[in-house]
Structures are given as C-alpha cells and as structure tokens.
Amino acid sequence: MKPIGPKLVLATHNKGKLEEIADLVARFGIEVVGAEEAGLPEPEETGVTFIDNAELKARQAADLSGLPALADDSGLCVEALNGDPGVRSARWAEDAEGNRDFFRAMEKVETALQALGDDVSRDAHFTCALSLAWPDGRTETFEGKVHGELVWPPRGDNGFGYDPMFVPTGHALTFGEMEPAKKHGMSHRADAFAQLLAWLDARQ
C-alpha cells in the first residue's frame, strides 16, 4: 500500500510553498491541499526544536483533516549565539504588532555578533525539519541542513528571510544573490525534501 494518497494536506498558509511542494510530489499521484483550503488554523509553535514544531503542525493538521499531513519548520542557527535565532528565527523579525521585517532580524543577528568582538566566529547553518503525519498517529520526520557563514552588509534581493547574509560553504554568493534554482538545489529545505522523496520512492 502506498504511504500517502491520493490527497495530502500541507500545513501552511504560504501559497508559494504550497505550489513548490505540490510540484515535488506530483509524480507520486498525490494531490496537495493547503491549510487555508482545508480550513485549518495556524497552531502556536511551542516546540524547542525544529522537529518539535514540524511534528506539532503536521499532527494537528492530520488530526483535524483526517488526511495525511506534511509540515516543515526551519530557521537560522548561529554558532556564536548558541544556536540563536533558531526556532525563533521568524520571531526575531517581528515588531510589537507582529509585523515581520527580516532586515531588522538580520540587524539583530549582526549586532549580537559584533558585541562578541571582531574575532567572533561567523559560522552558521540553516535547518529544515519536515514531518509527515497520519491520522492514526504515525509520524515520519526528516531534517536537512546547509552550512555556511554570515556576511555584513546583506547582499542580494533574491530569496527571503536571512538569505542575503548567508554564504553557503564553498560558494562566494549569498543565498540572496543566487538564482533561485541554484539555491533550491542545495538548501536545507532541498536536503530535507530529498530525504522525504527517497523515502517515498522506496515505498512505491
């Protein structure tokens, strides 16, 4: 029996992410439905790890929809900042009203690094946890990472979030300067999805 199908709920209200994931799983004959279309609320992300939050979102979506559900959680981890902003990556971008400005978030990261001195390590990595949950309580979770270092000032208008200040190891351009297709081929999200797709392929 196929592990998913014919319909999968994606626990996100992000239309771009919905389209991207729908394309990735189309070859398995899976129809992807977004959380908004399924009438699902956005849960409070109370986990202390990316895996915690991905599983929390996937489990809630599966429970409420009665369908298999897929969710992800991702963020930037800076070694010299003890892994911050980590699971709070989006919250570092929020103001008092909850509006997000990632340039402000990047400034917070840079200010925190500069406070540690000129010789501070600028090593960092992005992490993406991807969780697949079923209404019966089963869960499969995959975690992808991409390592690199932070630069200042930010460079490039492509990508989103902290991309303009992150240079992946072995490259000269930031994720904000790279063509989207090149970034998507090496990103933390690409790593996690490659693991998911390999898992699905093995069960077809």
Image (cartoon, grey):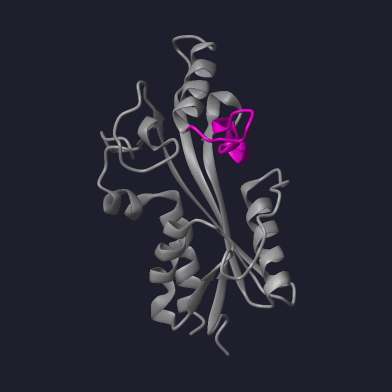
Q: Residue furthest front?
A: 97
Determine if the magenta segment contains residue 95.
Answer: yes
Based on the picture, tell me whether residue 53 belongs to the magenta stretch: no
Q: Nearer the viewer, residue 183 or 60?
A: 60
Q: Position of residue 86 (x, y in %)?
A: 59, 37
User: Residue at the location (44% across, 28% down)?
Assistant: 103
Q: Is residue 41 left or right of residue 85?
A: right
At a point 74% along the width and 77% down the height, the residue shown is 136
Over which residues does the magenta segment extend? Answer: 85-101
Front one among 76 and 22: 22
**In the rendered view, would you say 180 is above or below 200?**
above
Identify the image quadrant of residue 57: bottom right
Whole-percent x, y for residue 43 in the image: 69, 54
Which image quarter holds the N terminus? bottom right
The residue that appears at 70% across and 43% down in the rendered structure is: 48
- Is 51 located above or below residue 131 in the figure? above
Image quadrant of residue 7? bottom right
Q: Position of residue 190 (x, y in %)?
A: 41, 56
Q: What is the x, y in percent for residue 121? A: 47, 21
Q: Is residue 178 above or below residue 7?
A: above
Dominant secondary-structure state across the stretch colored magenta: loop
Say left or right for 134 vs 31: right
